[in-house]
Amino acid sequence: MAEHDGGPSARNLEEGRLLKELEAIHRTRHETLLYGSDDALVTHTQRMNELEHEYVRRHPRRAQTAGRTRSGARARHAGE
């Protein structure tokens, strides 16, 4: 498994590990944004993007909630 500054390559992670990595990186995002160094934020962003892109690559037809789409958001705001 190839390693780099942000951990093992997302492409090489088995599905369960990919999901755990995604959960962990999303959990730490806010704290990294507020308190991390510029380098830490860049590294965090790169790793988050790598993991998210891999998830989307594996799940191109993933379930999407209508309220989380652009048209769903417009409909929600129109009803306010």
Image (cartoon, rainbow, N blue to C red):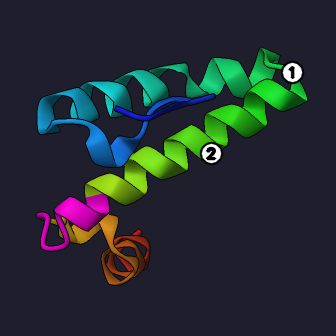
- The answer to whether 18 is drawn above or below residue 54 in the figure is above
Specify the farthest residue to the front: 1
For the N terminus, the image quarter is: top left
Residue at image point 23% right, 33% down: 19
- The answer to whether 78 is drawn above or below residue 24 in the figure is below
Look at label 2 and name its amino acid. Gln
Badge 1 crowding class, 10 Å Cα cut-off, few under 14, some 14 to 19, many 20 or more, is few
62 is within the stretch colored magenta: yes
Q: Which disc is residue 46 wearing?
A: 2
- The answer to whether 64 is drawn above or below residue 42 in the figure is below
| Tag in front: 2 or 1 | 2
Q: Position of residue 29 (x, y in %)?
A: 58, 28
Q: Position of residue 73 (x, y in %)?
A: 39, 72
Magenta stretch prevailing secondary structure: loop
Quadrant of res 66:
bottom left
Quadrant of res 6:
top right
Q: Nearer the viewer, residue 46 or 61?
A: 46
Q: Position of residue 49 (x, y in %)?
A: 52, 51
Q: Position of residue 31 (x, y in %)?
A: 66, 17
- The answer to whether 39 is drawn above or below residue 63 in the figure is above
Label 2's element?
A: helix
Q: Is residue 44 left or right of residue 51?
A: right
The answer to whether mark 2 and mark 1 are in CB contact below 8 A is no
| Residue segment shown in magenta | 56-63
Look at label 1 and name its amino acid. Ser
Residue at image point 28% right, 53% down: 55
Q: Which disc is residue 37 wearing?
A: 1
